Amino acid sequence: MTHIERITDVPEPMVPTIRQRMEQRGANVVVHDQGGGLFTVEGTYPDTQDAVAAVGATGVLAASPIVAPGPLTDTQARAAKAIVNIFETGEVLGDYGRVTLIPGDTGHLTYGRSQTTLGSGLLHDLLEQYVDNAGARFAARLRPFLARTAGRDLTLDHDDGFHNNLRAAADDPVMRETQDVFFDTAYWRPALKAAKDAGLTLPLAIAVAYDGRVHGSWALLRDQTTAADGSVQALGERAWVAAYIARRRQWLATHTRADLRPTVYRMDAFQRLVDQDRWGLTLPLVVRDREISAMTLAGAPPRVYDGPAPGTRALAVASPLARGLDVRLLQLALSDAGHALKADGIFGQSASEALRQFQQAQGLAASGAADPAQVASLAARVFAA
């Protein structure tokens, strides 16, 4: 028996990286054009012990038969992902540049749309995939951190320069596409298989399974629910999911980890959808005061910037505050120069003060504002060799 690994919906820039990784693990690789700039990459591995072990070595992709896409439409799948995005970052489309550190979280530093963690090693895997892409704009800035993320260096929890590089990288479409492929591979496809194995077919039930995979301990609570309340087949899918939600809520509420107890909101949100009989995830939905609709699913991700280009405008504290790519790169340059500030892409008082200190140190007029030429000069430092 051969082992087949298939990754669908791969953006074109990611195809060479995924092909290379499969071939390095001994696969014969075929790429299929799905249309619309998306591709399916399929690797066939020989049935040898070494080859099968190699497939699982990444900790992300596993040697297993092809998993069918499941019973969801594309809109239902996007709605299920949006629910968990809201749980993770408060945003329907996720927050690709979100850097979070929750006291007591054993995962330590978390990053990105679905908040992958330093402690699990998956943050390293994500960054490695990104920097290996020839088109990754921030590859040279993030590559020096790979050894530290591979070693789960916990000093990165408080490394402001690293955090600012992560935030800025989210402005790169290659990073956003890398995250989409990575999180689908690490969480979404395993959740589809887990749901299928458990006998779950309803879109809301699959969303619950996906949340369990992302948040953790899906298998533990699944088995506890089945042991205490009965199987999906015995109870019926809806009753089993309701029992699982109640059991997981109790487990979270009484957990020894203080950081997990407040996350009962996830089960409360699912229970609300159950009470509303939203098993089909028919749009629109409201989850934690966020609207999931055709319009919000088609919107732009929050807090990422494609412009303005540095040098096209002056920057100063104004109302409304200036936001954009030029601000982010100016902040990143000031951070590199040793000034403590968050590269959030918003030119406020902190950015102005850091700029004023930089200007003063350089013997320039210390105004805390920058004309287009100075903005361009500072931004150019970010990608200087």
Image (cartoon, rainbow, N blue to C red):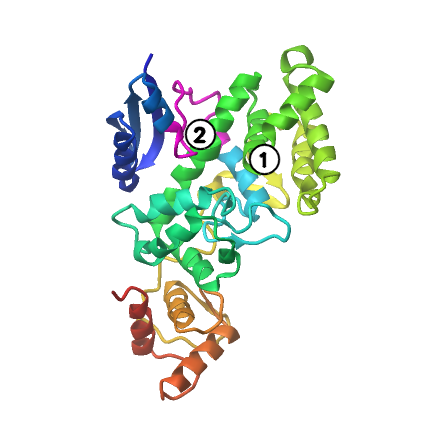
Q: Which residue is drawn at 48% across and 20% down?
A: 71
Query: Picture coordinates of residue 204 (x, y %)?
Result: 59, 27
Separation (CA) of disc 2 from disc 1: 24 Å
Please state the extent of the stretch shown in magenta in the rendering.
55-77
Query: Picture coordinates of residue 109 (x, y %)?
Result: 53, 51
Task: Tell which of 160 and 265 is nearer to you.
Answer: 160
Q: Indicate left or right for 139 with 361 as reference.
A: left
Query: Picture coordinates of residue 57 (x, y %)?
Result: 39, 32
Give the residue type at disc 2. Answer: Asp
Q: Which residue is drawn at 64% across and 50% down?
A: 104
Task: Tell which of 88 and 259 is nearer to you.
Answer: 259
Q: Is residue 101 magenta?
A: no
Residue that badge 1 annotates: 216
Residue that badge 2 annotates: 74
Under tag 2, what secondary structure? helix
**Total numbered labels placed on residues in the image:** 2
> How busy is the neighbourhood of tag 1: few (under 14 within 10 Å), some, or many (20 plus)?
few
